[in-house]
Image: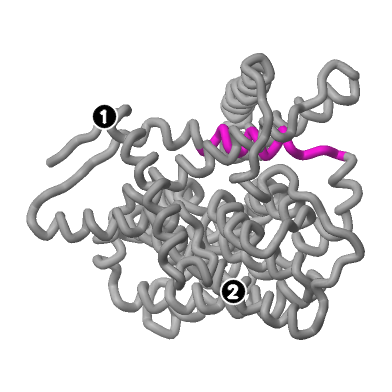
Amino acid sequence: MIQLDFYGTLVAASLVLLLGRALVARVGVLRNFNIPEPVAGGLLVSLVFLLLRMFDIQVRFDTSMQTPLMLAFFATIGLSADFASLKKGGRIVVVFLLTVSGFLLLQNAMGIGLATALGLDPLMGLLTGSVTLAGGHGTGAAWGTLFSEKYGLASASELAMASATFGLVLGGLIGGPVARLLIKRVHVTGCNKQEAPRLPKGFEQPNKERSITPFSFIETLALIAVSLLAGNLLNGWLLGTAFELPTFVCVLFVGVLLRNGLSALGLYQVFEREVSVLGNVSLSLFLAIALMSLKLWDLAALALPIFIILAVQALFMALFAIFVTFRVMGSNYDAAVLAAGHCGFGLGATPTAIANMQAVTQRFGPSPIAFLVVPMVGAFFIDIINVIVIKLYLTLPFFVAL
């Protein structure tokens, strides 16, 4: 057993990111299919650990920084959310939200239908639907415990973690190929022609140089720290109430209030370039730690019927993004980037969605509207809608009878 402490884990995560960057730069397949650098590096390292496990060698990381990094990323998403900009994209936000909400309903119907056809408990279908795929590990853990305690579903928590892991991997792998396919279609139809060149902003180009100063860095770091503290306090107050939300949603909400409240009072204007730098650092390190510490043997241990359900769910996500999301959102370049983002949080998590879109925009050009819409829908609205959808399904007759 090799146990890496905080510092060893930080070194390993940094090396994974450098490895991923080198792989994408040198391997044409990864570059052509727009595979995010943290996904490329993290999956390769997790495969190496899977091989080492066969020789009874295990590596464990100190993942204590993983949650703070994720929360810091969502804080920067909130601090980047300008109400004036959101008003401009209001209609597109609503259309995209309705599209992904419809997908959640179909995702659960697909899971329940497949589980029933394979002779499994319908709850397993719901667990391998939006509970773990759109919901991720946190939502999966919460509902897995409920399914075990209230409905008596054996090993629900273990199944939830394995399904969420599968979704995280596939969400980072299919987004790039889907976008590549759609962008080829855009080039053929000429839908991507623009009246004027658009400048990259915020999270679109993480490698773009940005001038910062020590004092401005401290100001932005203070805003992120306040968002983390107030968000955790808000989460504690809401715990156990009808308004209970995941911690990252509370942190994001505080970030939005800080950004727009300080601006409205004329006290401070958020330095967007610096917020995006810190956000991209948090995002990259979070994904590197999450992916390099994946226990791929948990996926190998999935029963064949469950694996079939998850594989079909991944295929369904790709087809929905291609034939529904892309078309509903306008069949243009922005729609292709949105489709890549939808694959990311439809199967995995919002950080995966952002990484997918960054991989696309760094190669094909900026898409401001996608980076405006996806973070707000994927990180905020979708969790609220998902809870409503899950509870709606649990009121169906065959669930009530359990």
Q: Crowding near pointer 2: few (<14 within 10 Å), some, many (20+)?
A: many
* Quarter of the image where the N terminus is located: top left
Point 63% across, 50% down: residue: 383
Q: Tell me if residue 126 can be seen.
A: no
The spot of residue 26 in percent (x, y) is 42, 63
Q: Which residue is mark 1?
A: 5
Q: Crowding near pointer 1: few (<14 within 10 Å), some, many (20+)?
A: some
Work out whether residue 361 or residue 10 is closer to the camera in this orientation and state it. 361
Q: Quadrant of residue 242?
A: top right
The spot of residue 265 in percent (x, y) is 90, 19
Circle 1: residue type: Asp
Q: Give the magenta-colored segment's residue range.
A: 70-83
Magenta span: predominant SS is helix
* Total residue callouts: 2
- Residue 190 counted in the magenta span: no
Q: Quadrant of residue 220?
A: top right
Q: Is residue 12 left or right of residue 205?
A: left
Circle 2: residue type: Val
Work out whether residue 299 or residue 181 is closer to the camera in this orientation and state it. 181
- The label shown at residue 113 is none
Q: Which residue is mark 2?
A: 178
Q: Secondary structure at mark 2?
A: helix
Point 19% across, 35% down: residue: 3
The spot of residue 390 in percent (x, y) is 59, 59
